[in-house]
Image (spheres, rainbow, N blue to C red):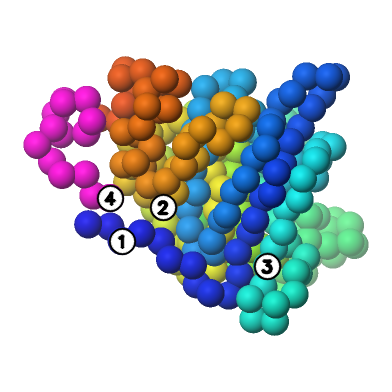
Amino acid sequence: MKKMIQPCGLHCIKVNHLGVAIGGQTILEDINLHIHCGSLNVIIGKNGAGKSTLIRAILDDIPHEGKIEFKDRENGKIQKLKIGYVPQTINIEKNTPVSVYDLIASYQCRIPVFLKKSRKMEAEIRKALEVFEAKDLIDKQVCNLSGGELQRALLAMAIMNEPNLLLLDEPVSGVDQNGMELFYRTMDYLKKNFDLSIILISHDLDYVVKYADKVILMDKTVLKEGSAKEVFASEEFHAVFGAEELPEYAKGGREKNRTPDF
């Protein structure tokens, strides 16, 4: 049996009574979450449930009510939260002469990267790319990357500043099966080795079963949270998704005799 995630005792992230209203319409209402470091927290829900809006609110990209706190238990003080972010897509025009090095270095440096290529910066970028098995991408033009390659470059960029929280808004859309497996294995590696919390929006329920420490079912508010086993067995999940979207093990299909590895 997979043991439940335990707080490390050093820090955690709390979302308290978060709400978003746009044009008089309530998009999110009374969201409360407690996210421990070293955990993969997966948000699931139908389109329009407010999942991406929650990510934007945590990023402080849109007006919202409520508070988001990062509590450092070593000294008892609330510190500034460092966030890494990977969006679902970015728009890059074809033939744009920007390499992966240029993209990441421009995010890290105040000095225009085309003035001088820093060996130190190049080494740091290669190291970050290596985490995602992507160091050979450093000189490739971003506009020529596949979906999976771009995803790995963006993930490398997101962890360069050693964030406390990594936000991932459906970053594996359009990625093939091998890319999906690599992505989720990498998430497992990150949470164990970088002492960060991960909040991931995902529709890939079979991978959620395998890798998530906590699953958060949303429909404008948090309907249910807990282990994948608890959430997928809940009335709330069945009301939102119905039996057709259960992970494979729960359908009575080809894996019906296997005990889920929760």
Query: Which one is in front in this view, the residue at disc 3 or the one at disc 2?
Result: 3
User: Which label is found at residue 213?
Assistant: 2
Residue neighbourhood size for the residue with mark 2, other residues' Cα within 10 Å, grouped as few (<14), some (14–19), many (≥20): many
* Residue 200 horizontal/vertical position (percent): 54, 43
Tell me the quarter of the picture where residue 230 sits: top left
Query: Can residue 80 be seen in the rendering of this structure?
Result: yes
Closer to us: 180 or 242: 242
Q: Residue at x 49, y 64 (%)?
A: 38
Q: Residue furthest left?
A: 257
Residue neighbourhood size for the residue with mark 4, other residues' Cα within 10 Å, grouped as few (<14), some (14–19), many (≥20): some
* Residue on which disc 4 sits: 262
* Residue 162 horizontal/vertical position (percent): 65, 66
Magenta highlight on residue 90: no
> Could you tell me what secondary structure mostly forms the magenta stretch?
loop
* Residue 81 horizontal/vertical position (percent): 73, 62
Q: Secondary structure at mark 3?
A: strand
Mark 1 or mark 4, earlier in chain: 1
* Residue on which disc 1 sits: 3
Distance between the Cα atoms at labels 4 and 3? 28 Å
Q: Determine contact: label 1, label 4, CB under 8 Å.
A: no
Q: Residue at x 60, y 32 (%)?
A: 221
* Residue on which disc 3 sits: 71
Closer to us: 188 or 183: 188
Query: Looking at the picture, does residue 121 appear above or below residue 249?
Result: below
Magenta residues, as a range?
249-262
* Residue 163 horizontal/vertical position (percent): 66, 62
Mark 3 or mark 2, earlier in chain: 3
Q: Residue at x 31, y 61 (%)?
A: 3
Three-letter amino acid code at disc 1? Lys
